[in-house]
Amino acid sequence: NLMPKVQMLRDRGFSDIGIAKTFNRMPSLLAYTSERWKDRVSLLDAKGLLAENTLGTLMVLTDAKFAEAVTAKAELLSRGREQKPQKLQEETEAFLISSGLSKAEVRKVSSHLSTCFSPDVDGKVKAVFRWLAELRLTKLQINKVVVAFPKIFSCSLTDQLQPAVRWLSELGMDNAQVAKAVIWFPAFIGLSLEDRLKPCVRWLSEIGMDDSQVTKVISSCPQIFTYSLERRLKPLVSWLSDICMDDSQVAKVIATCPSLCVPTLESNLMPKVQTLRDRGFSDTDISRAINRMPSLLTYSSERWEHRVGVLDAEGRLTEEALRSCMALSDTKFVECYEK
């Protein structure tokens, strides 16, 4: 009950210090129902009204009073934005354009800045650009990160971004691995270190990965931090174990192909395995195929359905043929199996 509420604020850019200040102002804030928290925090965030000094006062209101207050504050905020000194907005946009962003990209980033804070070019925007450069990202890569994850400007450099990178380095990730992860999926760097990043790494170690495997998973599939341990990752490991894989094999498969964690279990991975079972493959056969080619299950369901069907119709569906054909381009597959 309590931790998910705190996580709602962290996911929306609140630092732990900011969260502590919010609860100090109103200790009873966490006592309100999860439903009220979810509805009101989401609405305030969407309206650009979510702030440390207003959350408590708005949470106590009745539904009717809350709706009135949100409407009134949104109107005031809108007028305030219209009256915002044009010079600040122009400075921000000029800096973003000088950094190489297109006008469309500038509009996307700038629209986020206007909902989370006054566009302080020197104190916030340039500071984030400098920090990303310190991670040895190129100018083009920095722009890619900023456009993909404009909420990075809402994250605290000292309380959130820098501690996360220091922790990744302590795990054994070198600069290139950290940069790769940030470029590939920058949103992970804005997640809570204590509640999201560290528990995920502990779990990877618990399933048998060594340090080098853990860092490889993070650098190549940083979105793994966004997945629920209880609802997604642990069930995946349990399912792989059920198809005749021992602990070391499960760890090796996920370490070799972390993108196996991306597809959903019930609607994607399980139907693929059932396709093979329906055609006479034993779980031992399936386990061996996955161990030999961990990426096998990551191909699209459409590719699986078509290619397994073709091989089966021609009496050529074997473990080796399955692995060989799945990686072929469509053109090559037609040449080899459909002519």
Image (cartoon, rainbow, N blue to C red):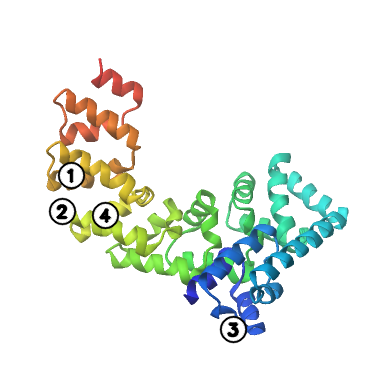
Residue picked out by circle 4: 252
From mark 1 to mark 4, how far is it between C-alphas?
16 Å
Disc number placed over residue 28 in the picture, else none: 3
Residue 231 vertical placement versus 93 (above, below)? below
Q: Give the class, few, some or many, for how many residues have Cα within 10 Å of label 2's Cα (few <14, many ≥20).
A: some
Foreground: disc 4 or disc 3: 3
Mark 1 neighbour density, 10 Å: few (under 14) some (14–19) many (20 or more): some
Q: Secondary structure at mark 1?
A: helix
The mark closer to the camera, 3 or 2, is: 3
Location of residue 173 by image quarter: bottom left
In the rendering, at what x and y percent does residue 188 appear? Answer: 51, 58
Q: Residues within 10 Å of mark 4 (few under 14, many from 20)?
A: some
Residue drawn at point x = 26 percent, y = 41 percent: 272
Q: Amino acid at mark 1?
A: Ile
Q: Amino acid at mark 4?
A: Lys
Q: Are marks 2 and 1 in contact (CB under 8 Å)?
A: yes
Judging by the rendered image, the residue that carries numbered circle 1 is 286
For the point 67% across and 66% down, the residue is 50
On screen, residue 320 versus residue 270, left or right, reads left
Q: Residue at x 32, y 51 (%)?
A: 265
Q: Are the two marked residues, 4 and 3, in contact with CB atoms closer than 8 angstroms?
A: no
Residue 267 left/right relative to 218: left
